[in-house]
Structure formats: C-alpha cells, structure tokens
Amino acid sequence: MASRTPLVSVILPVFNGGRFLKSSIDSVIGQSFKDIELLIWNDGSEDNSVSVIESYDDVRVRKFASTKNQGLFQTLNFLIAQATGDLIKLWSQDDVMKPNCVAESVKFLERHPSVGMAYSAYDIIADSGAVLRAAPVDLTPEVIAPNLAAQIMFYHGSITGNIANVMIRRSALESVGLFREDLLVSGDFEMWVRLAEGYPLGFIKEPLIFLRSHRGQFSRRKGIYIQFMHEDFDIIQTLVNRLPMEILDHARRYDRRHRQIQYVHHFLRCLLSRDWDEARGAYREIARFGGFAELLIIWLVTFNQRLFRMKPLYANQSQLSRGRAATSVSH
C-alpha cells in the first residue's frame, strides 16, 4: 500500500495521447517501487484520452483536466504544485517505463544527495514497441559538476535528451523555480541550464525507459524546429557566459561552424521543398547571428560538415569522453 505522502510523484501531462496512453500508464502502475502517486493532467484532449484515463481506479492515481489546451510547461507546473512527493518523476504519454525505473532513480538520488536532478539512458522503440536502437555507450560521469554540465549543454543541447527520463528533487525546484511558461518548446532545456548553475546533475547509465519514436511526436510538427531555434538563442548565450575562458574562442567558432550551419542546412532544405514560410522563419533566426553569406560559404566548403567537422573542446578533456551527443527530443 502506498503511504499517505508518497516519496515519488509521477506527473503525466496528456494531450491527444490515447494511442499509446494505456501502455504508458500501465508501466507506471506496474513499477516495482510502490511508494508513488501518479498525477495525470488531461490538457484538453480531443481523442480517446479521457476514456483511457477514466478506466483507472487506483488510489495512487489522481486525475485533473482542462477543457482548453494549456501547453506542456504550464501543465507540468500545475502538476508539480499538486504533487506531494519529495521526488518528482516527469513522464510522457508515449513512452514506457521499465519495471525498475523509479526504484533505480530513487537509489541513485539517495546515493548522490548533492545531485539536484537525475536522468537516465533510454532505448528507442517503434510504434509497435520493437526496439529500434538500444542505448549507446555513454561515458558521461555519473555526477556532472556545474562547470562540466555547462560545457556539455553548450556543445550538445538539452543534456537529458527528453523529459521522460528525468527525476527532480522538490527541494531543487523550490530553489530554482518552476518551468518557464513563456517557452513553448525549450522549457526543459532552460530548466536544466538553471538547475545546473547551482546543483550537480546525475546520469544513470542504465537505460530505464523505452522512448517511443513515431510520426505524431510534437518535435516533428511543422514549425517546431524554428521555435527551437528562436528559444535556444538566449539559452545558448547563458551557457556561453558560463564557459571557462580557456575554451571560449574555440566554443564560439564551434557554434558558428556547427549549430549555425545546421540552421543554414534546414533553411536550404526548406527552400528545396518550397516551404517558403518555414524558410523565411529559418532565415529570420539565422539573421540574428549575422554574416549569412559567410555561413553559406562554410556550408558549401565543408559540404554541410561532411568534409570537415569541428570537435568540442573541454576545459579538462580528461573530464569527459562522451559516447554520444545529447539532443532535444520533445513530445
């Protein structure tokens, strides 16, 4: 039986997630660690999500709803405010927890009391549930100091790669504040940057969830990439201001020849596909960096980085040898 005040609050925002929602909820209910509550917010869904949610009659499940879609980060903030646990496990309507997910996350945070937030590796699955890609080898240290976290996120983006593999201490959220609700897509990235300023971050090397890849993902919707470009601009500048002086020049060149070249590539793909609105949006964001002609020349000379690609440089290269790069994957 769950205690009246569970240790872990699992929070699940839902918007038109009926297709995979049952397997997502079942994987939470079936956790080996039982001292949990599951808070589900139906954020104005128009599919069968409501009937799926209402089919659960479990004392650990608390249900909330709005008739109008509020957005991911406002919903997460509401659920955090309603949660009673000392540990907040973020969850997703598409994905599947392995049975030991919560237990191993709790053990990790108990073992590392200084860590403000922990994230795990993950396997990627298809619509059918078949494994598309097992978690690759990743040599990121278990405890990531603030200085190192800033460098990783500058070079690779959102360090967790997702929200569904994250568990946060309530005390850390009370210290740094909740998710920014003015951000539509990069609120998680901005939160990790904020958390990493005052707390070490934790990395659980064991893959604890199955992350589902499918066409309906939020991150694949039209215009979302432009929104990422827009919102990441200020977040990246925050990280630049935290970088060690000895790598600052290299980091700025890397940003020019890597991230900004990726943006140019997206712009050119939009032109080729005659997606004029998307191309105009990409050009507006690229123009914020200046020197568009120079970027285009770099894209051409490096053949979109296929002929030459700069490598990240860390202040203490022996600190880190990453097996993979973190990337943003939003639902």
Image (cartoon, rainbow, N blue to C red):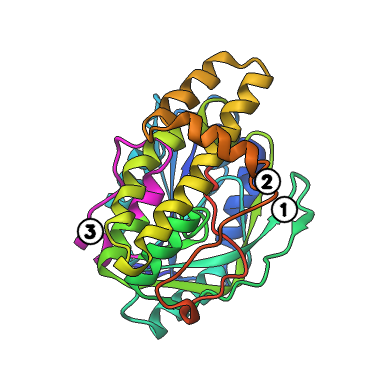
119 above or below 268? below
Res 54 seen here: no
In the rendered structure, the answer to whether residue 84 lies left or right of residue 47 reads left
145 above or below 239? below
In this rendered view, identify the residue nearer to me: 19 or 151. 151
Q: Which residue is mark 3?
A: 176
Whichever of callouts 3 and 1 sits on the residue coming sooner in the sequence is 1
Whichever of callouts 2 and 1 sits on the residue coming sooner in the sequence is 1
In the rendered structure, the answer to whether residue 175 lies left or right of residue 154 reads left
Secondary structure category for the residue under label 1 = strand
- Give residue 213's mark: 2
Q: Could you tell me which residue is drawn at 79 percent across and 54 percent down?
A: 130
Measured in 3D between alpha carbons, the distance from the residue under mark 3 to the one under mark 2, in whole angstroms, is 31 Å
Measured in 3D between alpha carbons, the distance from the residue under mark 3 to the one under mark 1, in whole angstroms, is 33 Å
Label 1 packing within 10 angstroms: few (<14), some (14-19), many (20+) = many
63 above or below 152? above
Part of the protein shown in magenta = 169-191
- The spot of residue 145 in percent (x, y) is 36, 75
Secondary structure category for the residue under label 2 = loop
Q: How many marks?
A: 3
User: Within the magenta stretch, is there residue 176?
Assistant: yes
Q: Which residue is mark 1?
A: 125
Look at the numbered discs 3 and 1 and tell me whether their residues touch, using CB distance below 8 Å.
no
Label 1 amino acid? Answer: Ile
User: Within the magenta stretch, is there residue 239?
Assistant: no
In this rendered view, identify the residue nearer to me: 139 or 154. 154
Q: Could you tell me which residue is drawn at 55 percent across and 61 percent down?
A: 311
Secondary structure category for the residue under label 3 = helix
Q: Could you tell me which residue is drawn at 20 percent across and 62 percent down?
A: 175
- The spot of residue 109 in percent (x, y) is 40, 77
Label 3 amino acid? Answer: Val
Label 2 amino acid? Answer: Ser
